[in-house]
Image (tube, coloured by chain):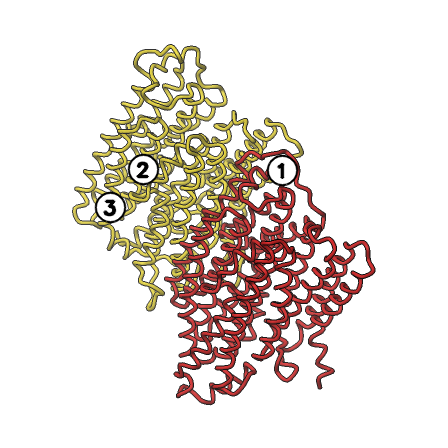
Amino acid sequence: MIASELYYVTPELALLGFALLVVLLDLFVRQKKVLAGVSIAGVIVSGAFTLALWGTPANDVFYATLAVDRFGLFFKLLLLVAVGLVIMASQDYVGKFERFQGEYYALLLISAIGMMLLVAAADLIAIYVALELSSISLYVLVSFLKDQKSSEAGVKYLLLGATASAVLLYGMALVFGLTGKTCLLCIADMMELVGSGGLLSSPALLLGIVLLIAGFGFKIASVPFQMWVPDVYEGAPTPVAAYLSVASKAAGFAVILRVLLVGFGGMAVLSLDWGLLLGVLSAITMTVGNVVAILQSNIKRMLGYSSIAQAGYLMVGLAAVGAAAGDNALGRSGLIFFLMSYAVTNLGAFIAVIAISNKTGSDLIDSFTGMSKRAPLMALVLSLCLFSLIGLPLTGGLIAKVYIFSGAVNNGLLWLVIVAVINSCISAFYYLRVVKVMWLGAPATEDKVPSSWALRTALSLCCLAVLLLGVLPGGFLGIAEAAVSIFGL
Amino acid sequence: MNSYYLTFVLALPAIGAIVIALLPKPGQRAIKLTSLAFTLASFALSVVIFAQFDRSAGAVGQMQFEERLSWIPAINAYYHLGVDGLSLPLVVLTTFLGFLAVLVSWHIELRPREYFIWLLLLETSILGVFSSLDLILFFLFWELELIPMYFLISIWGGGRREYSAIKYVIYTLVGSAMMLAGILSVYFTSGSLDMTQIAGLTAARPVIPFAAMFFLLFIGFAIKLPVFPFHTWLPDAHTDAPTAASVILAGALLKMGGYGMIRLCVTIFPEVALRYAPLLVALAVINVLYGAAVTLRQKDLKRLIAYSSVSHMGYVLLGIFALNQISLTGAALQMFSHGVITGLLFAMVGLVYDRTHERNLDNLGGLVRQMPVITVVFSIAGLASLGLPGTSGFAAEFITFIGSFSSVAVNGMQVYTLLGVFGVVLTAGYILWMLQRVFYGPVLQKFEGLPDAYNVDKVCIFCLVGVILLVGLYPAVLTDIINQGIMPVARLIGQ
């Protein structure tokens, strides 16, 4: 019965309700700050509904198009945290588009709905629709500044995104053509049925899987689909770039994990294939990201390349999952933990950048010189986040790396781990450069950097989370394990 | 037996750092006194541990003052601390140097609050390395040390400080990256991160060959020690670091490398160590001779002392991979002794430089007239460094050479040992020549009226001299304990 199943999508429905409310209120309310408050309230309500669902047993609803399980719920919470922090940090940024704040918040919420559906989708068509819902809102958000760079970024994102969608759709069509099914579980059953005979060795199926990975690869910014990242991050409003770098990536990884593990995970032969494919892609992705990041002088571009590199580390986890052929809790939970740590770390870094750039009016790394005197809190948190991105101790970054790499070593991917750790050393070079100018340089002026209390709260939350993940990771690892336990075979 | 002594030793400097960070508008004096109090407390507590350490035969191979709490259950990581005969001297050395480093920094005026916070955090992280018994915890502290050192060199250093700081960080990161890969493969081969359980590792199906794991770990430690050809970060970092950081860097930090080699490389993989001992011993001899030869050519006083560390760490490497009970004991003693001696040498260089603002040997000379105390103490340190009997340097090097000469682990060990002994001659050469160029010769007009050591400096340098003489005259104060830690290792190697 469909109506009774509506309970399972209450988080999305709640968020949708609040998004519409924001649009409506925008017409009447003069004090636009209220809109941010309403959006935050929506995020909290939606989060409460999500938490309420945490206890329900895993099942599929709406004719097996949406899965309700801890994996999906975990990612919904992560996405809500991300969008909540981004909205809080936007307080200091929305002045740049004073009149359109209502649309801005509503679009952020709607794209969050798309991603929340995406992480729960258990059917190829549902996946596609959810993906488009989030993407189309993001196309608009990226070009929200309406200046030349922002519009260019929007168009670029739109064109490349549309291409990626087409590739994805083609992959889905191939898979559907060979199995006759769109729901992931049915696909897995179909393959089981046919066995290791003709279908599995069919090049068309392999092509289908490759195209699927390519389509999602755009979302997570893996090589060779990473071209858009630096331009889009640079041109987009900074909070949107932060949102893209965290939420879009997390959703992308969630959907890849689900498709590969549920749809194609049962086949040992096949998963070995995509395990190696992802391993090689991962090595290239992190190397490209890190090496090119060294050359950047704009901090948003640098963070863009850094996020490509981080996607590379995350793919180490994916490759481990693949190489393990279905029996690797460590790789999967490592991936989840890394995503948690990456989300708060990257958001923290971007939020600090929002505050500082707002004052200096520049995104150049040089303009951060001497910030330890002008904005001690921002400089401290930004340094901490950059340390976490390098993977230095007391931050979530170190535990995340140790954890995700241990999954890979356990599955015979030591070569990949060595590539990854060497990459971490390379990354130290450009991350530390920012730390260096902030703490060692003399500031150009003595002006303090102002910030709203909402932004400071968001920043402190990120900082706290990074430290907690680094010092007492036990509880978070427990959550990560609970989230992936649904794939236990 | 959870006593929490070690936790306190470890935490006191860090707590001191937090207190300094939270003090509302502290004066310089308050900051310095706070640092002094916390490092002194940590030192005092480590001496208590040293005094209470069970030296009886029954305690051989036992970790003492163990603490164990579950930390990350998912990968069996524990907050697991403990000391044995190998690590305890190094813990005491670190707290001692940490305390003296505060005294050495007494005249710091640039951003003192941050400076002392970093200095105290540095001490905590090094202590953590020496007392962790869990591989992940060990790795965490190993990496943690980077951050304070980076800031200490790049803000309060001299010369090309930013270059040196980043070079130091990148070198160490590469090493620890290899180490992490090694640690993870050890973990998945043995299923345990507990250092006390993985000695003499055997496994039917290791993740990668044991030799590969051995070298992954070894490279991490070799960069730190440093072993030729991974030593090039050292002269830059030592030379450009502020005096106190140089003292800690040369005194305590390098020992992390030697400690790791004994504790992990040799203990976990005794057979691999035996197989590759000839190669590593040859590297050790290169370290000794090449280091000494390069030292002879140095014009910069601080760089000279820095390069001498490369040479002296060669003895440690020689002692370790001669792989017998006596040579390993000698290596462990050499680590302690070099820590004290080089700590003193860097402190002395700091004193000379503070007064003359000159480190170029060509422009120095005749300082004995203005600075008699500094001259005498510098000479004692120099003589200890070249191994004069009655100083700790002699005891350590003598035991190392006896051990390695009698070792049967490597064919032709006697030849290697004799080559190593030749390093002592070169050391005598550069030390005496250096002393002559700095303190003797014609009195220079420009140094007229410079002050000798202040009282606060005297406390610091006399303490170090006292320890050098104590260990030199009565080495058993340490060797009794060190033996306890080395015996199980020697038993594993079968020597």
Q: Chain of mark 1?
A: A
Horizontal arrangement in the rendering, residue B245 relative to residue A94 (left or right): left
Between the residue at mark 2 and the residue at mark 3, the CA separation in whole angstroms equals 15 Å
CB contact under 8 Å: marks 1 and 2: no
Horizontal arrangement in the rendering, residue A123 relative to residue B344 (left or right): right
- In the figure, residue A422 lies in which quadrant? bottom left
Chain A colour in the picture: red
> Which chain is depicted yellow?
B
Q: Amino acid at mark 3?
A: Val
CB contact under 8 Å: marks 1 and 3: no
Say if residue B238 shows up in the picture: yes
Q: Where is residue A470 drawn, in percent x and y? A: 55, 54
Q: Secondary structure at mark 2?
A: helix
Between the residue at mark 1 and the residue at mark 3, the CA separation in whole angstroms equals 53 Å
| Residue A469 or residue B267, whichever sits in front | A469
Q: Amino acid at mark 1?
A: Arg
- Residue at image position (58%, 29%) is B33
Give the mark nearer the N terminus: 2 vs 3: 3
Q: Quadrant of the N terminus of chain A?
A: bottom right
- In the rendered image, which residue does mark 1 sit on? A374
Q: Where is residue B216 drawn, in percent x and y? A: 35, 55
Nearest to viewer (mark 2 / mark 3): 2
Q: Where is residue A271 drawn, in percent x and y? A: 43, 76
Give the crowd class for mark 1: few <14, some 14-19, many >=20 residues within 10 Å: many
Horizontal arrangement in the rendering, residue A157 relative to residue B248 (left or right): right
Q: Secondary structure at mark 1?
A: helix
- In the rendered image, which residue does mark 3 sit on? B281
- In the rendered image, which residue does mark 2 sit on? B310
Q: Eyeballing the image, is A143 above or below B51? A: below
Q: Residue furthest front?
A: A148
Nearest to viewer (mark 1 / mark 2): 1
